[in-house]
Each structure stands twice: as structure tokens, then as C-alpha cells.
Image (cartoon, grey):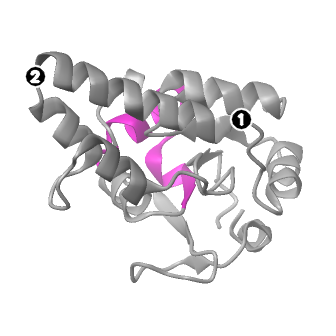
Amino acid sequence: MSESLQAVIFDMDGTITQPVIDWLELRDAIKAPPESSIMEHIRSLTGSEQQRATEILLETELRATEGVDLNEGFHELFAEVCSRGLRTAVVTNNHCAAMQNVLTQHSLRFDVALSRDDGELKPAPDLIKLALDQLDCPADQALGIGDSRLDVQACGAAGVRCLYLTHGQPKIDHEPAIVQLSEAVAYL
């Protein structure tokens, strides 16, 4: 990456932490059809159905954060990012309580921490743009790191270059891609 890099924006679930949510099981529990996102489905419900689906989602997210492990190489990457004086953000589609659980459990301190409670979900660029604003960082001087199509699309729509973390099993075609977090140091 260029010498003008000022900030790194991390996704949480599957990037900072090992992925633990069984999305198919969750979709089944709330009866979300495959053609809609979980949040779109929940927004389409009304009354007690919507409330129950929201509760199931939050319970699932909170349960997933209990004792969740960080991805291999995260501590080293984060230490390198901080040692270079780069600002940091975590941007997640998870609930704020789930995000805070992870940050507290692992004593992680980011300059900015945003969840779905703060704006439109990824792949919309809103949360990435809000992070950039709060970091006081131009889009072309930030680097995003995420493990999903949603992360790549949100960063792209916000004008931020995104490293796609594949864990060795790419689900989309995107460059630059890395298999593990330790490879991200080369892009700083």
C-alpha cells in the first residue's frame, strides 16, 4: 500500500474473530427465505413475528461471542497496524452488544467501533463512510479487511480498497485477496 495509508477498517465476524455463527441454522430458525438477507426478512415481518426473529438473531449473535477466538494472526497484524501509527476501526453488521462483547473479552481498542445500530448494513457504504468521517481519513488513504462479499462491496462503494480474507476458500472473485491475516502486513 502507499505511504499515505492512514487507517485500517476491519470487519469483525470472520475477520477479527473466527466465524462461528451457523447462518443456515439461523435462517431456518427465523424462516428467512434464501432470496432475502436476514435483516431484510426481519424488516418484512410485523408485530410479534418481527420481535421474535429479532430476539433470535440477537441471542444467536451473543451466544456466538461467548469465548469466541480471534483469527490466527490478528494480534500480530493489529500490533503492526498500531505500531505504524495507523488509525483503526471495526465495522460490523452485528448488533452493538455482540461487538462490545468481543472487544471487551479480548481487550481490543479501536479508534472507531460501529455496528448495525449505527447505520445501514453492509453492503451499503454508510458504515464505512461513517468510519472514515470519524477517523478523519479520506477513502483513498484507508484499507478495509473483510471476509465476505458484503465487506468488499461496502468498501468498494465507499471508495476504500479492500483486502478479501478467503481463509483458503474464496466465495467471490476479488483482488487483492489473502488467505490469512498475516499476509495483510504486505498491504500496509
- Does any portion of residue 181 appear in the rendered image? yes
Q: Secondary structure at mark 1?
A: loop
For residue 25, side relative to residue 167 (left or right): left
Q: Is residue 1 above or below residue 21?
A: below
Is residue 139 shown in magenta?
yes
Q: Is residue 117 above or below residue 182?
A: above
CA separation in Å, label 1 and label 2: 30 Å
Question: Residue at point 81% right, 63% down?
Answer: 72
Badge number at residue 45? none
Q: Position of residue 110 (x, y in %)?
A: 71, 31
> In the rendered structure, which segment of residues is drawn in magenta?
122-146
Task: State which quadrant residue 113 falls in.
Answer: top right
Is residue 105 shown in magenta?
no
- Residue in the foreground of this view, choosing between 127 and 115: 115
Between disc 1 and disc 2, whose residue precedes?
A: 2
For residue 96, side relative to residue 82 (left or right): left
Query: Farthest front residue?
Result: 29
Q: Position of residue 138 (x, y in %)?
A: 48, 42
- Residue in the foreground of this view, choosing between 1 and 18: 18
Question: Residue at point 79% right, 50% down?
Answer: 81
- The residue that label 2 is drawn on is 46
Q: Is residue 145 above or below residue 122?
A: below
